[in-house]
Amino acid sequence: MDTGDTAWVLASAALVLFMTPGLALFYGGMVRAKSVLNMMMMSFGALALISVLWVLYGYSMAFGDDVGGGLLGDPFEFFGLSSLLGTSGLDGGFQPESLVFTVPSMAFVAFQAMFAILTVALISGAIADRARFGPWMVFAGVWATLVYFPVAHWVFAFDGAESETGGWIANDLLAIDFAGGTAVHVNAGAAGLALALVLGKRRGFGRDPMRPHNLPLVMIGAGILWFGWFGFNAGSALAANGQAAEVFVTTLVATGAATLGWLLIEKLRDGHATSLGAASGVVAGLVAITPACSSVTPLGAIAIGFVAGIVCALAVGLKYRLGYDDSLDVVGVHLAGGIWGTLAVGLFASASTTAGVDGLFYGGGVDQLWRQALGAGVVLVYSFVLTLVIGLAIAKTMRFRVAEQDEVTGIDSVVHAETGYDLDSLGGGRSATPGGQAHAEARGMTVPTERSRA
């Protein structure tokens, strides 16, 4: 065990955990005020549920010994994680008996758990304003079991790391997905599209304004995501080494370039560079560089990020042209950005990096490009089809979508019996009494009635 590597992986796990509350703020600010709590609860619900499932069997399904064709890990190999406990008695009794490379297996368990949590939470943005919380929690558990855990095995389980045999994308196809372009972003983006089709459009989609209710929350959430993403990407080196340092830099510059690309498109198309565009550009760049961060130079990362900002800024408009209601642009940012970043490995990869592979633009031909395309395509189709089946089954048995009147009233008050903002308390409670109402009217203030509030 290397203590420096262990410290970095544990710190990175904490950074990635912080991304889920960051996503809750990012998504929460983008919806209307009447559903902000429901939106944030979907992220926190995923955090709670997937943490438990990961310990019970999710880690085994993802990183257990392959049980057939590189498709699935043995769900019982590390069930409950008890087999990964124990020390050798060296180093004061804390030297672990089970290691993944130079870090304790339990540190790797914690780090990878955060990826599973975030991937599930990402999907929720596609169905904002219209999903019941209970069915969402059922969906989250079933989807993680049938989709994320197997796909994580395909992409992240390398032969000899935790178990003897791993997944087919990592070991047979040899596609490069350093930190989850396919396993996280293409996976969640395809699922978001399928679930948006299952639940249908929001009432008034394409007709009524559905502007973000709190852009400062959006900006704060994007900042937290950017901060946490250094653990997401650089932590995937699983060591405090030169590769982690290279990945840190490529993650930084790609994100900056993507933000500039998105803002440029906004300025040219709409005449204004917006805060929402800046926050969205940040996420687009982070998504695109995730699979490529270990295989491209800093200049290649700038190119990938800049193109990602442009591509994703244009892709978010597809929902209006094609008629699907992806509420918070999970498809436009995560699916489009994840596909572009995965394919970009086959274009911009350089053998001078720690990945040691040349892409098309560096004389490597199309060998790596087709591997990237196949990996992304299979994950996209698998996730879309399985999500469609899971979503339809829940919709038929549990009524996934809220009733129309509840959607109009607001999910927060109907489903959670709460509101995000207690505006009635701003007057210090005086307007709640006849005297308070008279005081307010004497100052020229309008006191809302229950009907006008509704």
Image: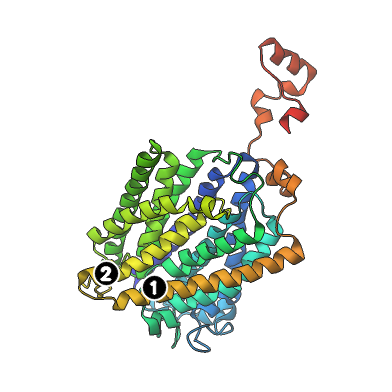
Q: CA distance from mark 2 to mark 1?
A: 14 Å
Which comes sooner in the sequence, label 2 or label 1?
Answer: 2
Give the percent coordinates (x, y) of residue 15. 43, 58
Q: Is residue 127 visible?
A: yes
Camera-nearest residue between 78 and 30: 30
Task: State the residue position of label 1.
Answer: 373
Residue 371, quarter of the rendered image: bottom left
| 357 on left or right of 206 | left
- Which residue of the protein is positioned furthest toward the right in this rendering? 434
| 207 on left or right of 298 | right
* Figure colour scheme: rainbow
- Residue occupying the point 35% across, 63% down: 234
Give the percent coordinates (x, y) of residue 57. 59, 77
Task: State the residue position of label 2.
Answer: 349
Q: Badge 1: few (under 14), some or many (20 or more) residues near its Cα, within 10 Å?
A: some
Tell me: residue 152, above or below residue 282: below
- Residue occupying the point 32% across, 64% down: 293
Give the percent coordinates (x, y) of residue 350. 23, 70
In front: mark 2 or mark 1?
A: 1
